[in-house]
Image (cartoon, rainbow, N blue to C red):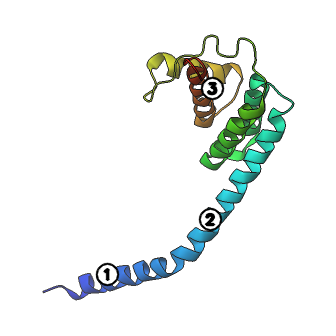
């Protein structure tokens, strides 16, 4: 037999779970809607910026905006990544943009990690998001090195 205390805890947990289950859909729907709107705004800003910039300009602008984010949070990193990819769609190529950039691999190599870390330090940009944005540069440079791309 369950003790009264254990039974009470189970009832409390079930009540909390029920409340969360009933409230989560509306909260989650609003959260997802906000993220979609922000992503679309970042994409449009990136496409617009890319019309008058080159690849390096796009990267510099995304890194500057990321550096200004409070706490360099995940949402900001995603937003700047969306901006960056869209900007590159429209941007002119930058001479030497891929020189010294390590090849992209799914699992970052120690050389790639070191390259990203030092690049962020040289630019005096804090946060893991800087290195994640530089991974996008690796992807772009590795994709452009492929034949017929």
Under circle 1, the secondary element is: helix
The span from disc 2 to disc 3 (Cα, nearest Å) is 29 Å
Viewer-side residue, 125 vs 144: 144
- State the residue position of label 1: 9
- State the residue position of label 2: 31
Badge count:
3
**Which residue corresponds to the image point at 71% horizontal and 22% vertical from the top-left?**
123
- At which x and y percent is residue 117? 58, 23
- At which x and y percent is residue 147? 55, 17
- Position of residue 82 in the picture relative to residue 111 (left or right): right
Please tell me whether mark 1 or mark 2 is closer to you in this view: 2
In the rendered image, which quarter is residue 63 located in? top right
Under circle 3, the secondary element is: helix
- At which x and y percent is residue 103? 52, 18
- Position of residue 100 in the picture relative to residue 41 (left or right): left
Labels 2 and 3 touching (C-beta < 8 A): no
Disc assigned to residue 137: 3
The span from disc 3 to disc 1 (Cα, nearest Å) is 51 Å
In the rendered image, which quarter is residue 35 located in? bottom right
Q: Earlier in the sequence, mark 2 or mark 3?
A: 2
Q: Residues within 10 Å of mark 3 (few under 14, many from 20)?
A: many
Viewer-side residue, 35 vs 40: 40
Reply above or below: 123 against 127: above
The span from disc 1 to disc 2 (Cα, nearest Å) is 31 Å
């Amino acid at each position: 037999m369950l003790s009264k205390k254990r039974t009470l805890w189970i009832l409390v947990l079930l009540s909390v779970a029920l409340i969360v289950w009933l409230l989560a859909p509306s909260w989650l729907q609003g959260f997802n809607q906000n993220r979609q709107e922000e992503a679309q705004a970042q994409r449009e800003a990136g496409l617009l910026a890319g019309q008058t910039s080159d690849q390096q300009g796009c990267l510099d602008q995304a890194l500057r905006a990321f550096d200004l984010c409070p706490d360099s949070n995940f949402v900001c990193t995603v937003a700047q990544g969306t901006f960056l990819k869209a900007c590159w769609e429209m941007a002119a190529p930058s001479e030497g943009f891929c020189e010294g950039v390590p090849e992209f691999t799914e699992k970052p190599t120690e050389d790639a990690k070191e390259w990203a870390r030092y690049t962020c330090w040289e630019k005096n940009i804090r946060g893991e998001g800087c290195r994640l944005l530089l991974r996008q540069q690796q992807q772009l440079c590795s994709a452009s090195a492929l034949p017929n791309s």
